[in-house]
Image (cartoon, rainbow, N blue to C red):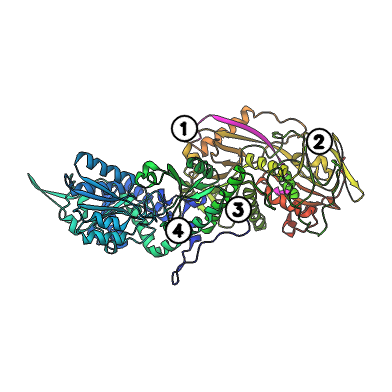
Amino acid sequence: MSTDLVPLRASAPAPGTVPLDVAALRAATPGMRHAHHMNAAGAALPSRATLATITEHLRMESLLGGYEAAEALAPRTEQVYRSAARLLGAQPDDIALVESASTAWQRAMDALRLGPGDRVVASSSTYVSSALHLLELRRTHGIELEVVPADADGRIDLDALERALRTPASLVTLAHVPTSSGLVEPAAAVGALAAAAGVPLLLDATQSLGQLPVDVRETRSDIVVATGRKFLRGPRGTGLLYVGPGVRERARPTAPDVRGAQWSSAYRYEVVPGARRYETWESSHALRLGLGTALEETLGLGVERIRDHVTALAATLRTALPDVPGVRLADPAAAASGIVTFLRDDEDPRETVRDLRALGFRLTTVPASHGQWDLGSRGLERVVRASLHVYNSADDVDALVAALEGRERRRRPSAPTARHPEPGTAPVPTPRPDGAPWGAATTDADHADVIVVGAGIHGSSAAWHLANRGARVIHLDRFPQGHTEGSSHGRTRMIRRAYPAEVWDGLVDTAYGAWEELELAAGRRLVTVTGGLFARPATSPGGLRGPGCETVDHARAAELFPGLRLCEGFSAVHDPDAGVIDAAAALGTLAALGKAGGVDRRDGCAVLGWRREGAGVRVDTERGVLRADRLVVCAGPWTGELLPAFATRLDVVRIVNLHLGSSRRHLLEPPLLGAFSVEVPDIGLLYGIPAFGGAGVKIGLDHGPAEDPSVTAGPVTEAERERLLGLAARFLPAADGPVEESITCRYTMAPANRFAVGALPGEDRVLVAAACSGHGFKFGPALGAALADLAGGGRRPDLDFLSPAAMGLGAESGR
């Protein structure tokens, strides 16, 4: 199925339920800036508040000491027990705080002291760690183990369970939601059967607590184990253990600890009456307090609202996936949680996940070794698992389905869509904005509707957009493809919403949308959101601002980007939507899409001059004469050569970039470092891109000496290199590795760092996008679409502020 025209949407919440404010939840979840995170069943993204709780306590420990900080916040720690009890329908004394669900399981099972003749009845959905423990108890302690089969829908077979409980048993164990699918087991029905047989129930709520209601009274659970890192959105290294009063009477810990027992005389001790008897003294108080914040957030949202949101999203995804060619669901019929599992035909799930990760999706795989009684019995070696949470929206589901469709089209080419044709097919012509047809219905290879000069980001974007609308396009560049003489080469570029003036905001918003359109057409990720910090001395006037941006001091900047060091006296604008463009992939993508759409690309073909000829334009090249209805000039540093009126208004300058290695690379990668710039007094604007795509962190200065574009750019000099290395040592202390790559490029600067986009004054047949002053790459697809609009007779009043006429230019043919 296609989501190009009809986006998927989750079903409406249950009547009377107030929907979650997903936008607010995403804004409060820093990790959602970086990817479509769909791995809550592995480790959900914590909120900013949870992170702050953890870091604040660690800071307090550093100032007061660990014991003193724990004592100071003892009331808050007690609140964690109350919150956990409230979530489970229990009492605070029934709760133990542990390090993980597996730790909770092991302490509870060991305390039961099972031995020969004790019989354990387990569900086939049992998690690997629990199953391994049971198998070891069977081997070393002589317990009997019976695994109850699943029914036709995948749930535990209740009839088989009832028959199994006719024989005396010591324990029933049930995984409420398994790790291997979206199945939801009938916990209440299982609890009722176990209670009727007088057998305690151990409920593994690892994958359900936080996304589904879990009430020990309703399920008649005697023991519940859960983790903090999954749907509770707590930190790793936290877990919960519930043990009811009835079981505690006979379930003593096998290795009592000072936390859970009192040494009363030389040969005597007493365990504490509550579930804390299963705890140990040493623990991370910071992580437990973070878990408390996560629990409070879950309670504040309401588990029923969370359930309605995540199950509706998952249901939408389950409905959509079977319509994607080559994709099949792996969930059983009883799947009803926020987890969805699937497979792609003839593809290892690990490859599926790797490719989706490259497109900005966070999913994982589950092997049969994590669920032999489930996946193994169903003959599945491994599945892809997507798991949704409160910070996911229908847009995430739409994007995942579209990405899978795009990958399938590349794996198995089929019929093209009208909007984005497959390689080797012609686009379906669309009318020009002025209603006239494109006019080059001719077999003359040297006659086109539009000639585009320059194969950088703007020229390549314009050529693709024009061809995609049915125009016949000849695309020229004076150098071979992949050259490094202009402004568009290199690995990465920055994108940001932060700009000095509001007049840019509309175009910036258009640019973000244009990149999304290009990604959809390409079926690959080209923009990665990392967030950005743009710093300057706090006393400096002006600076950046923009939608969603905020000003922060140097201390807050250090929290946002630990990899960037700003000293006191600096402030920064934080732009959460800033990010990194894969520039090399973008140019390659545009070239491929243009070729697929019929663009006649001619590299190594310099333009000698042009002039009006009748109702069109004549272009003289090294290879002969070309003619077209329109001419689009995106010649970068050579704009003044082709459009002499620009020659006195534009300056071409030399720019140097370095990619630097690191012994602490994680400090220079997202999310510990994003896009950034620092206005350095007496030096200039240092800018940088985080380590990305296997390359080290990229840095450069935003201005340089004048350079003649007719002369081949020379290599980076030792002085240029040392200057940037000195700035790196000052602001990027982790950039202590070797210079991995050095690059030169050229900026074409206009007065006030503006652009010139639109018709050449007095010459409506010639359009220009030039002088993008070092910040134009981010606008590439947007300006390409604008040039296609203008070439077809359309109007773009949103670009009037960038009109070449505003620079006081007149028309003059090229010479």
Mark 3: give few (<14), some (14-19) or many (20+) Cα within 10 Å: many
Q: Residue 487, located in which quarter of the rendered image?
A: top right
**Residue 741 magenta-highlighted:** yes
Please tell me whether mark 1 sits on a helix, a strand or a loop: loop
* N-terminal label among 3 and 2: 3
Q: Report, in whole angstroms, how far the alpha carbon at label 4 lies from the one at label 1.
A: 36 Å
Please tell me whether mark 4 sits on a helix, a strand or a loop: loop
Image position, residue 208 (x, y; %): 36, 56
Q: Residue at x 73, y 40 (%)?
A: 455
Image position, residue 493 (x, y; %): 62, 42
Left or right: 615, with 485 as reference point? right
Image position, residue 529 (x, y; %): 55, 48
The tally of labels here is 4
Q: What stretch is highlighted in magenta?
A: 735-754
Disc 1 target residue:
663
User: Of 72 and 491, which appears nearest the observer?
Assistant: 491
Q: Where is 140 relative to 101, above or below?
A: above
Name the mark on residue 390: 4
Q: Which residue is drawn at 57% across and 49% down?
A: 325
Q: Which of marks 2 and 4 is in front?
A: 4
Q: Which of marks 3 and 4 is in front?
A: 4
Q: Which of marks 4 and 1 is in front?
A: 4
Disc 4 marks a residue whose amino acid type is Val
Disc 1 marks a residue whose amino acid type is Ser
Q: Report, in whole angstroms, how far the alpha carbon at label 3 lies from the one at label 2.
A: 36 Å
Name the mark on residue 220: none
Mark 1: give few (<14), some (14-19) or many (20+) Cα within 10 Å: few
Disc 3 target residue:
497
Q: Which residue is drawn at 16% across and 56% down?
A: 273
Mark 4: give few (<14), some (14-19) or many (20+) Cα within 10 Å: many
* N-terminal label among 2 and 4: 4
